[in-house]
Image: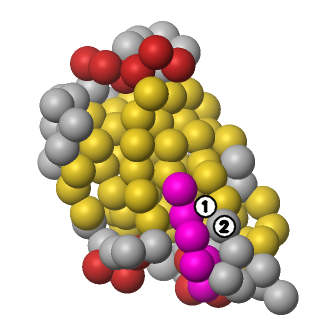
Amino acid sequence: QLVEAGGGLVQPGGSLRLSCVASDFSVRQYAIGWFRQAPGKRREGVLCTGTGGSITNYLDAVKGRFTISRDNAKNTVYLQMNSLEPEDTAVYSCGAGPDCGKVHKYWGRGTQVTVSS
């Protein structure tokens, strides 16, 4: 099971850090990806971290603003989001799988991020 936290309401230009905690397995053994889905839109990949520390950026719109990191000791993967824009408003969820092309073995329920003034 994966549980996301850290969402909320933030003004444009602000920052949030989301966390994805695994409870039944070790994140060390899985690629972990962050995804988002805005109302009326399809889910899209954001960033993924592989088991060896590699980073896959699925979405050009977040380059230079979002970063992903993992703390294996805490069994947690983070998504640091800076310079947030209203277009970043979405439900953010994390998934786990054998590699960043297949992060669908485990899913969390998501956390809402709203960027608005």
Indicate the position of residue 90 as horizontal and vertical percent values.
Answer: 60, 69
In the image, which disc is placed on residue 80?
none
Magenta extent: 80-85
Q: CA distance from mark 1 to mark 2?
A: 16 Å
- The amino acid pointed to by label 1 is Val
- The amino acid pointed to by label 2 is Ser
Residue found at x 42% / y 58%: 67
In this rendering, does residue 43 appear at all?
Answer: no
In this rendering, does residue 61 appear at all?
Answer: yes
Corner quadrant of residue 35: bottom left
Residue found at x 40% / y 50%: 68
In the picture of the structure, the residue carrying the numbered disc 1 is: 91
Indicate the position of residue 21 as horizontal and vertical percent values.
Answer: 55, 28
Q: Is residue 78 above or below residue 82?
A: above
Q: Is residue 93 above or below residue 10?
A: above
* 103 magenta-colored: no
Q: Nearer the viewer, mark 1 or mark 2?
A: 2
- Please, what secondary structure does the residue beneath circle 1 have? strand
Residue found at x 57% / y 70%: 82
First-in-chain label (1 vs 2): 2
In the picture of the structure, the residue carrying the numbered disc 2 is: 15
